[in-house]
Structure formats: C-alpha cells, structure tokens
Image (tube, coloured by chain):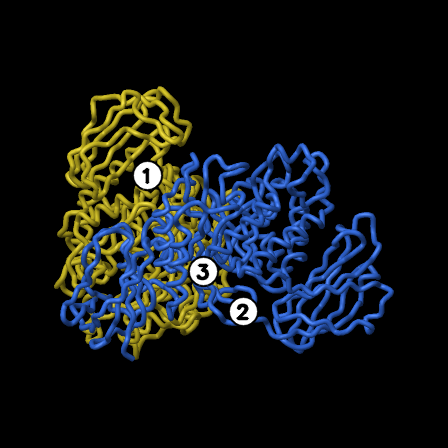
Chain colours: A yellow, B blue
Amino acid sequence: MKTMILLLSLTLSLAQAATPQVEQWGMFEVALEAQTSPNPFVGIDFDAVFTQGDESFTVPGFYDGEGVFKLRFMPNRVGTWSYVTRSNYEALNGKTGTLTCTPAGPDNHGPVGVRNQYHFGYADGTPYYPFGTTIYEWPFQSPEKQQQTLETLKSTSFNKARFLLIPPYRPEYCEGPHEIYDFPFVGTNKETFDFARFNPGYFRHLETCIQQLQDLGIEADVIIFRPYANPHWGMGEMDMATNERYLRYVIARLSAYRNVWWSMANENSFMEYLTDEDWDRLFHVVRDTDPYGHLRSIHNADRIYNHTHPWVTHVSLQYYMAVRFFGASPMLRDIYRKPIIHDEINYEGNISSRWGQLSSEEMVYRFWVGLIGGTYVTHGETNAGEDMGDGWISTGGTLKRLSPPRIAFLRQIVEEAPVDIDPIDQYFQTSLAGKAREYYLTYFGKESITEWPFILPKRGDLEDGLKFKVDVIDTWNMTITPLDEVFEIEKMGRYDFIDKDKKVISLPGKPYMALRIQRINP
Amino acid sequence: MKTMILLLSLTLSLAQAATPQVEQWGMFEVALEAQTSPNPFVGIDFDAVFTQGDESFTVPGFYDGEGVFKLRFMPNRVGTWSYVTRSNYEALNGKTGTLTCTPAGPDNHGPVGVRNQYHFGYADGTPYYPFGTTIYEWPFQSPEKQQQTLETLKSTSFNKARFLLIPPYRPEYCEGPHEIYDFPFVGTNKETFDFARFNPGYFRHLETCIQQLQDLGIEADVIIFRPYANPHWGMGEMDMATNERYLRYVIARLSAYRNVWWSMANENSFMEYLTDEDWDRLFHVVRDTDPYGHLRSIHNADRIYNHTHPWVTHVSLQYYMAVRFFGASPMLRDIYRKPIIHDEINYEGNISSRWGQLSSEEMVYRFWVGLIGGTYVTHGETNAGEDMGDGWISTGGTLKRLSPPRIAFLRQIVEEAPVDIDPIDQYFQTSLAGKAREYYLTYFGKESITEWPFILPKRGDLEDGLKFKVDVIDTWNMTITPLDEVFEIEKMGRYDFIDKDKKVISLPGKPYMALRIQRINP
C-alpha cells in the first residue's frame, strides 16, 4: 500500500502537519471532517485544485461516511504540489496544503495510456502490452477465494483483470446475513436500497482489490455498469441521474489508483433502456471528471457502441469471429484507428453455453490470431458445475486449463520484440506482422506445413542483401529453436523478396507453429 | 430523355407559357438568360424554392454558359408545384412559375435511399439490391467506345456503375486537339486551366452519360474527386475553396438526376493534402446543398474515412480481405449499422498489379461471401494490354470474363427472395443468411462437400413441425435444382434444429454450391 492518508481535523491547523510525501503516480489523500446535511452524498460540491507550476488537476472529492470527506490525488510530476479545496459547504471550502512528490519506485511506471496509436504504454514511456484475464465477480467472493485468486494471478503472467464494480444477483445473497459481500448502496435488497446513499465500506473493499492488483503489476479494467440481474437488484435499471451520481462517486474514489481503466459496462446493449446518447453522456462524465484521463472504453453485446467517438480511447470488443480468422483485426485497426482489445473471445472451458467451450488450443490460437493482427486479446476460463458461477470468469479461484502458460510465452515474445507488432501487408497477407525490414512474426495457425519458403513481402524498403536470422517457435509446446542458417534476401518479381539461395525452412508438420525473423545486418 | 426544359426569355411573361408537366422524380429545368459579371461562375447566388403544400425544396442553380442560368428540380410528389427564384443578381431574382408533376412512368421508381438499415430501396418502396460494376473513365472515351459500354451494360445485369467525374491524366490528351474529351475547367492543361471557370459542355456530356445509364435502369455512382494524376492536371490538389465551388457546381447540375449517388472520392486518402476534417466539410456541403438527399459515401485507400458519421449514408469500402472470408461483413454491419457496399474487392483479370488478378471463380466467390454477410459487392474487370488503361474498369467497352452472368444469376436469387439477406447467427455461424424461420441461403464456398445435414440454428422462433423446401444451387453453373423432399424440423440440443428424420442433403462434392431453404407451412 503506497497510499498516503492525511486526516485533517477541522480544528487542527494545517501548519502543524509536516509536508507529506507521496511518490509519483502514487496516491495522496486528504480527509476533512464535516458535519453536513442529512444525506452528504447529495448536493455537496467538493473538489480541490492541485497545482505545480503550469500543471493543475481538478480532483473530485467524495463522502466516505461517518462525517469524513476525502480527496485523492495522483501526482504526475515530482516536486511540490499545493492544493486548495472548493465546496459549496463552508467547512470543506478553501482548505489548502502542500505535498512533496518523490520519484516513482522501481515497479511504478504510472498509468497506462495509448502509445503509437494502436498500442499502450505507461506514463513513463515503458511499453505495456495487455495480456488480460476476466474475473468478473472476484471481489464479491469469500476472503479465502479472493486470496486464492491473487495467488493464481501471481503464478500467471496476466497483466490486466476485467471485473465488475456492481455485484451479481444471486438469490442466496438476498436472504442475509451478508457474510460474503456488501452492496454499493445502503440497503440489502431491491426494496430497501437507497440509490441516493452509497455504502463506503463496499467501495473500500473494491479499493483494496484494485490495490492488490496494482501490487501484482496488474491493471484493473473496472466495469462500472452491469446489465444483468434485473429486476432483482435494480442496479441495471437505475435512472440516468442515479447512474451519473454513481459514476461520479466511482471516479472520485478510484481515479487516483494508477492502474485503473474505465470499462463503462459489460455488454452495455443489454441495458436496453439506455440509448447510445445516454452512453455518450456517461462517457462525457468520465472524460470531464477523471483528472488523469485513464483509459476509457465499453464492452458490447449485440449492439456495438461507436468506438470511433473521440472520447473512447481504445476498442474493447466482444466479437468472437474477429479472432477466428486472420485479417479481421487489421481491418478493425483501420476502421477504428485506435488500440483494439478483444476483451471477450469466448472462454476456454466446458460449460453448456457455447460461448464457454473453447479448447485450450483454440484459446491460444485466438490469442495469436489477434496478436498477429496488431491487436490484443483477453483470456477467460469457465468450469461447469462450479459454485455460484461458471468458474474462473465468475469467481476467480484457480485456473484448471492449459492456455495460461502459453499466453505467458506469447507475452514474453511480444515483450522481447524490439518493435510493436503491426500488420505488414494486411490487404493481401494477414499471417505476418511486426515491422517490415526489422522484425517479422509469422504464425501458421492450424496449418500443418512441413516447409516454409523464405519469402518476405516488398514492404518497408526491403533491399537485396539484407540478412535475417530465424527462430522456429512452437507456440503450444513453448519452445523457441534458433536456426543456424542466415537468410539473405533478393528481389523476386514485383512483390516479393526471397532467400537468394532459395532456402526454405523446415517445419514439423503440426499446427500452432510460428517463425520469428529478425534482421541481423545494419 | 424525360427532362423537361423550359427556356424563359426575360422578356417573355411567365403567364404566356403553358404549365409544364414533368413526371414524378423526372427533371424539370428552368433556364434564365442574364448578362451578369465577367465570370458568372463566381459570386452569383442563385437558387429557387419549389413548394407543394408543406413540402419544399431549395434547389441550387448554376451557370450553364452563354448567358444562361439554370435550375433543375426533381419533384417527389404528384401535383402542382410552384417556385420562386432567389438571387443577389436582380435579373435572376423573384422569378416564379408552376409545374404539374404527373405520376411516375413504369420504370421510374425514384431515387435510391437506405431501406431497413442495411439495405437499399427506391423512393416508391421497391427494394433495390446493388449489383454494381466499375467503369472509372468511360465518359472520357471515344463515342464509339461509350456506345459499346452501354451495349455491354445492356447485356449484363449490373444496376450501378461507378465512374469518375474528373478525367484521367494521359499525356496524349495534353497535346490536343482534344477529340476525345474535354475538361471540367476552362483550359487545356495545368498551365491554362482556370479553376474558377467551369466548362459547361464538359458537364453536359457527363449528364448525357448519367441519363444513358438511367435509361438502362442503372444507378450512377459518380465519383466527385480523384486523387490521381498529380501534378499533371492539378485537379487532385485544388485548394478547398476551389474544391467546394466545384462540388457545388456538380451538385447543382446533377442532383435532379434521380439515379445519382455521390461518391465523394475514389481512394480519398491518396489526396494526402486533405484532412479528414476537410472531407467532413465537403460532405457537409453535399448534405446541405443536395435538395434530395442522394446517397453519400466515400471510397478509401489506405486510410478509411469514418463512415460512422451521420452524414455518410452507407459504407463504400475498399477492403479486399473483407470479402475473402465469411464473418467480416456481418462485423462491418455491426460496426457501422449502415448498408455496406464492398466497392472494390480486387478485379477479375490479368494485369500485372496484384489488385487486378482475380479469377472469375474468385470474383463470383467474393460476391457470394459479401452477399451472405448481408452486404453488397461491386464488380470490376481488368485486361492487360488494353489501350489507355487496364481494360473495362478504366475504359468500359466489352467484358471478356466469366463472372457477369453468374453475378446476374445471384442478383436474380436475391431479387426473388421474399426477405432481405441478413446474417442469422453471425457470432458463431457465418455462411448462413436470410431471415430465420422464413428463408435461408447457405453458401459452401470453396468447400467440396458431398452432403449437408439439415441443421438450422435456433434463431427466429424456430419450433418443431416447421417444414421447409430446399433448392440446390450451383452458383458457378447457374442451376437451381429443387429437391422433392420436405424437411420438417425438430429441436436437437441447446442450439439446433434438425430434420426430424435426420435427413441429409446430397451435394456433388465440388465448390461453389449453395442451398436455398424456404419454409412452406404457415
């Protein structure tokens, strides 16, 4: 926990406190006690402006219960920051202070944003390649199960987790006592929920979950709205004023966590009462309220939101077909001109729903197809018969299937590459990606070929005499076998370069093979 | 020619003329003589408001040379219309008149617009299914060649033609005399073009071409800007004021032709000096100036314009890969939520460029793949060594290859269908389309199967006891073979219905086969 908490009693002079310190992209918290109205969640404007030189952030505050209002700030620059609070309530207005921002620690690269148009990177410039997984309801499980989930994540290489901020409806939870989890709103069921009063303890638990992921180096792709479980909870059919109040509360509480991404909803179109324009408005709230511009997207069901809107930072897509064939992902990039994450591609597993029946081979295949298309893919696993859900994607816990180490293997290849993986000749050839002239990955998918003629498409100023080394990759068995030969290219015809000695590469005649081709002369 | 021309001398009282008649969606023309400024193409505002009851159109006028200004009006309602002209030039201002609009003739269904979100229809409600071809430069050929093109079109079933309004650059045309064609601007080469003066004779010829297509029942998908031939002509690098003036002139002249569609450009991104915002602005001019709202799109090269913009009526796409596999077109529909026309899918032919080397089989295959995806496809043919271009796509003339009758065969199937062809289960099954419960087309593409088990996906309220008849379609040999058996369905498992007697359908084990399945009981 790198959070700095500063509780300011209203009777305590600010001058008495030493200047607090917080690391870059860490979290600085201000707490102010104030006895306000009967419902302090409504009608009290409270924020602060944090300033350093020409940089300033307007940071929304929130009521944290028991007479305490808080502000959380994530400084993006080393040095001294000062702040002043603003409120329509006198006790919260005009409070000032300073903090010292120290350099980021070794594992802290800041929040993730868009890099090179189609890719992602941390604020300090380090590339970030998303290899996510899906654990929709892990925060709402028993403490033991949550711990188990964290242990599992520690043992895999997933660096993004998608999960919901609104709990699932399950009948047993309506019968109380609520040992397992709480609710975002005061109340215990649809009849008693007060949608105008939040339950701070509920959100504190979510914050712990986000921090736990952060400590593991995992981005928290938090899903703000969920369509399911109507009419039981009513949380998927709140009116727009309630939606917006909830959204602002979430942003005020969570945006200073550097690993947060905003996923507006899961399968948003299943909230049929909300129009695209309603979603526009909710997006605008995030854009205008989150001081740090965390990544923003939305995940579709049958109706795809218009991800070309400028307030959508990247495409979070559910479209299974798009990772079943080469060529779809490059097209999506060309349409959206943003990073694409295939955030739901069916799940590896064995449940009776056809969206949760992928073999491990197919899951890994879809990861490679997406990756070779210049996009990213998110994992999920189901297991039939698991308590209260479909297995890992619902509850977290343990992973039982074979894709995770292969996904980790792919991640390692991507992170070792000196370039981003982009399509090279996407209108005609779609199983080849990387950066022309420098670095190529070619993936043979389900083909079981025994040789590959060394041919590169005429892209990126290829010229006679360039030399390449080749690694044969078995994506399933996770082996990388360097070849001894050097391949020197020579032009052939209008569109191709081949090895000047017409060398071919032997392959073992089984599926899921790939080649890594890297230039070796300057 | 159904155009009604009314030349009003300024000295002739309007009352003296009998009320002119024009059929619905025909063209009514007003001509006014006026001696104006040294360059009447610039600085003279001239339009007219045509009114019938609560309907009114603001119709832009244009200078047609030799002291004559014109207005062209396409009435959309039977009955009496009145009009009044407006101008900042007194001789063109305040002229009034009436016309009688008579019912449309038998082959006149009005202009084409969007129907059922993903499809097209004429203004009178008749469905229109685009089966287009590409003849970029046919208006700029010899009269004999133009006539030959029309004869060819008459013998095929293409009902849309894409062609350019700006001539190609060819060195021989710079050397004059210009026997073959003229230029849109006054002048004969880049040095002498006056981009502020149009050449009315040039446009009159284009109008003849559009009318000739209309007479054949062919929509004219006119391409307004072209990127090629810089720096020779300069017509692909005009400044935005010139672009806009040219665009307005085109709209004023052509929009009363009911068969006009606006294609803003071919391969627009090759006009690298124009930004997406420039194209937005040009689109806005069309949207705001064309009184009839003709279809509007733009055809891309390497950078795809954002077709989700509301001013784009349908997607005119160049993305070869999208018709090479099933599943891409349904995804495009889901992204754009508009009709999609794959307006360039590579061309059938034998030129040395790889974009013009499709076999006839592949061309027909791509038509079917697009069609089964709920989208439409446009044809084109190349021929190596043809004079002044790449064959049919450049110059028109004759067609030499095998796809046109097969495309006509497909068009007939589509037009006979009682439903539009839409995806049915696109997230999982992509070779089946039509309308669940009513009508299915399933296309086997390059598979050479010998039997097909009668299985329909559980979509569209299928229920036990529904009965279907089946036709076996050979898409290449253009045969339709009805089967004697009736297939009665019964549920099997969670997602499927099969024939209750487990009947399968025999197929000949060769590629390019399809089935048409139609429900026969109520």
Compare marks 2 and 3 and give the one earlier in the sequence.
Answer: 2
Label number found at residue B123:
2
Question: To which chain does the residue with label 2 belong?
Answer: B
Q: Secondary structure at mark 1?
A: loop
**For this rendering, which residue is in front, B77 or A304?**
B77
**Which residue type carries mark 2?**
Ala
Label number found at residue A105:
1
Which residue matches tag 3? B339
Nearer mark to the viewer, of 2 and 3: 2
**Which residue type carries mark 1?**
Gly
Question: To which chain does the residue with label 3 belong?
Answer: B
Nearer mark to the viewer, of 3 and 1: 3
3D distance between C-alphas at marks 3 and 1: 52 Å
Using the rendered view, name the quadrant where residue A436 is placed.
top left
Q: Secondary structure at mark 2?
A: loop
**Which residue type carries mark 3?**
Pro
Decide: few, some or many residues near mark 1? Use Cα within 10 Å; few <14, some 14-19, many ≥20: few
Q: Secondary structure at mark 3?
A: loop
Q: Position of residue B131 (x, y in %)?
A: 45, 57
Q: Position of residue B315 (x, y in %)?
A: 47, 55
